[in-house]
Image (cartoon, rainbow, N blue to C red):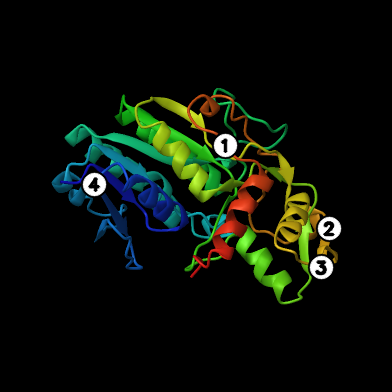
Amino acid sequence: MTELLVIGGGLLGGAVASASRERFRTAVTYNSHPLQVEGCATYQMDITGSVDLIRSLKPQYIVLTAAMTNVDACESDRIAAWKANALGPKNVALAARDIGAKLIHVSTDYVFDGERGMYREDDPTSPINYYGESKLAGESAVQDILEDYVIARTSVLYGWNPSRLNFVTWAVQEMGRGNKINIVNDQYNSPTLSSNLADMILSLKDETGIFHTAGSERISRYDFSLKIARAFGLDESLIIPISSDALNWKARRPRDSSLDISLVSSFSKPLNVEEGLKSMVKVAKQGMVT
């Protein structure tokens, strides 16, 4: 019997499954890339199609991490973005309602316009790109269908992931090769370690509502990069500060989408950037990175 179902086998899905399996009989679904998570059953499921697997497994809790997160790709292919980020959560929410499961839906800081930063859960949303719009539509679907739900908004997810680079692993790889990297110095977020986010998500399993589940530090991408270099003993001079206006992005980015994490701090401890990077370095030294 599955007690907790993690939908999505990426960086966050793997972290949630690893944390959950110590307390719950846990299963994980993937879409196109088969995976194995020690101690967990795995299944293939596309949330934009049939989600009858959810109804057959009948989990008590569902953590929805699957999404289309490439911001520029969402701008270019709005149909795919809508299916993954709006229709998918609606399908999962309907299945959760049918079996009486608690749904924890992972969303994003990009539901805000970035005009001021340090957003609280009850601040008005106003996305400025289609990724944010589609994720906000997914939030709305979950709220319309379910009474018992958690929407967990996060920001700049990072951590060790053997199948896909994220901001930290990309920066470490490039600087490790001696390559210069251009990093914007006018964009602020709340970087979040995947394992820390998994702990925050599980701590909210019996709560209801919207929670900002992110790292505890508001920081620019440039300053974040400097801390990455220092944590991993890399050459800071390889980091070149640039303005967002110098980049030819298809989608606009919020200038400051940092999140206020006061509410979730009552349930779990969000880590700052140095704490998160220190944890990554420790894992690397233990030889646990594949």
Residue at left 39%, top 47%? 19
Q: 93 or 221, which lies in front?
A: 221
**Residue linked to disc 1:** 270
Which SS class for mark 1? loop
Q: Residues within 10 Å of mark 3 (few under 14, many from 20)?
A: some
**Quick check: can you spot residue 138?**
no
Residue carrying label 4: 25
Amino acid type indicated by mark 2: Pro
In the rendered image of this protein, does residue 36 appear above or below residue 96? Answer: below
Question: Which mark sits nearer the N-terminus, 4 or 2?
Answer: 4
Chain-order first, disc 4 or disc 3: 4
Q: Earlier in the sequence, mark 1 or mark 4?
A: 4
Mark 3 residue element: helix
- Marks 4 and 3 sit apart, C-alpha to C-alpha, by 45 Å
Q: Nearer the viewer, mark 4 or mark 3?
A: 4
Name the mark nearer the viewer: 1 or 3.
1
- Residue 95 x/y as whole percent: 22, 40
Q: Is residue 190 above or below residue 36?
A: above
Which quarter of the picture shows residue 168? bottom right
Which residue, given by chain and number where applicable, does mark 3 sit on?
Answer: 238
Q: Amino acid at mark 1?
A: Pro
Q: Nearer the viewer, residue 252 or 107?
A: 107
Question: Residue 150 versus residue 224: which sits nearer the camera?
Answer: 224
* Residue 241: numbered disc: 2
